[in-house]
Amino acid sequence: MVLHRVFWRATARNPPEEVDFYSYERLGKPLLRDTPAARRRARGVSVFDSLDTARRKAAERRLGDYIAELHVPDDGSIGMEEGIGGHWTIYGDSEALRRCVVSVVPAVASGE
């Protein structure tokens, strides 16, 4: 049995497509600060360790209309780097990351 970590990621589509898991580097987005740490993080994708945080950040930054729940295997096949405030960066092939999706919910909770 493979253990996994649960993360949430804002996506533009439901169901998410591979492009929803492209890194900033692959998308060609410029760095806010050009540091070694920023360059490393730009090769990964942002996720959050709670649905509430993912929803809040999606609303604040207009990250997407949906939140995908990911079960990321804790076997080393996908890299994980903890940030601050519930933010993580995960590293892996975009299609492998898309295959980690187990469910998708609206970014705005019903009743909000």
Image (cartoon, rainbow, N blue to C red):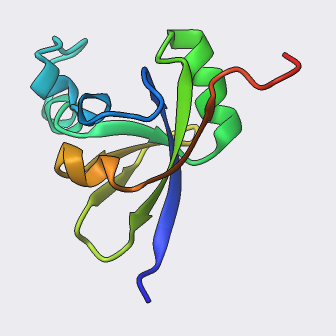
The residue shown at (16%, 11%) is 30
Q: Is residue 99 above or below residue 58?
A: below
The residue shown at (21%, 24%) is 24
The residue shown at (54%, 18%) is 65
Q: Position of residue 106 (x, y in %)?
A: 64, 26
Q: Position of residue 70 (x, y in %)?
A: 47, 52
Nearest the eye: 10 or 57 = 10
Q: Is residue 77 above or below residue 31?
A: below
Nearest the eye: 49 or 22 = 22
| Residue at the limit of the structure toward the bottom, as seen here | 1
The residue shown at (16%, 49%) is 93
Q: Is residue 12 left or right of residue 110?
A: left
Q: Quadrant of the N terminus?
A: bottom left
| Residue at the limit of the structure toward the front, as seen here | 15
Q: Is residue 41 left or right of residue 13?
A: left
Q: Position of residue 17 (x, y in %)?
A: 31, 33
Q: Position of residue 11 (x, y in %)?
A: 44, 27
